[in-house]
Amino acid sequence: MNAGQRFARLVTDVVVRRPVLWRVFRGPLRSQFDKLAPLWDERRSPNAFAPIESALDAIAIEPKRVLDLGTGTGSVALIVAGRFSTAEVVGVDLAAKMIEEARRKLPPELAQRVRFEVADATRLPYGDGVFDLVTLGNMIPFFDELARVVAPGGFVLFGFSAGAETPIWVRPERLKRELGARGFTDFAEFSAGPGTALVGRKR
């Protein structure tokens, strides 16, 4: 890993254990991703989100509203919008430059049901239980807020494009434990190429 990737892994490990420390790392990590935004898609491998595409097959509902946390340049949000042709999809990211890139590449035919917004995943500007599916592609999870916005019977989907080698990565055992404590069950794991994904459903 380069220095930026090592920093992302450090922040992930620290914040998953102690979410209160996000206030320390939020600004530096946002600045890092703002700088990366113009080159972000060029640096990503073509199959980066293959695990997420595989895991979407396990979603046993046709979601009406989907939230993509840590959307970056919007790749996962656009994959989800293509998979679920009637879903309203909201992609959020802390880095404003990433959101600018996502908006720039939004196809006109999806503009009526896909939007991108700047937001902090620890304080989302959405009501309780309003999303049927929440996706996180290479994203630090904030479990309390995540559980708050998922509707009963809804799903959460984590994807890590390089498995344990992904700079932002959380062990599946930790994901299951944290989600299970917040009412999620029916976990399923997936892999595609070097990447992994995990799906859970809220009771």
Image: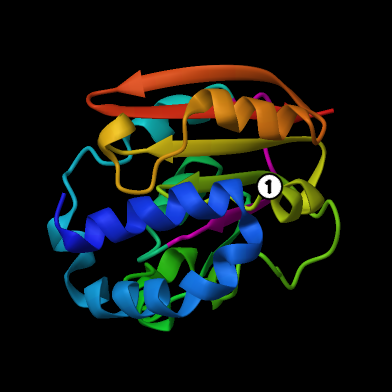
State the residue position of label 1.
143
**Where is residue 123 drawn, in percent x and y?**
71, 70
Colouring style: rainbow
The question of residue 125 being in magenta is answered with no
Residue 122 image offset from top left, x and y in percent: 66, 65
Is 144 left, or right, of 200 in this rendering? right
Position of residue 200 measured from the top left corner of the image (x, y, whole percent): 65, 27
Residue at the image point whose x is 86% and y is 57% from the top = 128
Instruction: Assign the magenta stretch its main secondary structure.
Output: loop
Image location (x, y in percent) of residue 102 = 38, 71
**For the residue marked with disc 1, what is the amino acid?**
Phe
Residue 2 falls in image quadrant: bottom left
Q: Is residue 65 within the magenta segment? A: yes
Q: Tell me the residue at 17%/43% (across/down).
A: 46
Vertical order, 114 against 153 (above or below): below
> Looking at the image, which residue is at 62% across and 47% down?
134
Of helix, strand and loop, which one carries label 1? helix
When asked about the image quadrant of residue 154, the answer is top right
Relative to residue 100, is residue 152 drawn left or right? Answer: right
When asked about the image quadrant of residue 152, the answer is top right
User: In the depicted view, which residue is nearer to us: 138 or 114?
Assistant: 138
Quadrant where the C terminus sits is top right
Can residue 113 be seen?
no
The answer to whether residue 135 is visible is yes
Q: In this view, does 43 lie above or below 126?
A: above
Q: Give the range drawn in magenta.
A: 59-71
Q: In this view, does 60 lie above or below 35?
A: above
Comparing 98 with 11, the one in front is: 11
**Left or right of 22, for residue 70:** left
Q: Dot 1: few (<14), some (14–19), or many (≥20) neighbours within 10 Å?
A: some
Residue depicted at x 38% and y 81%: 100
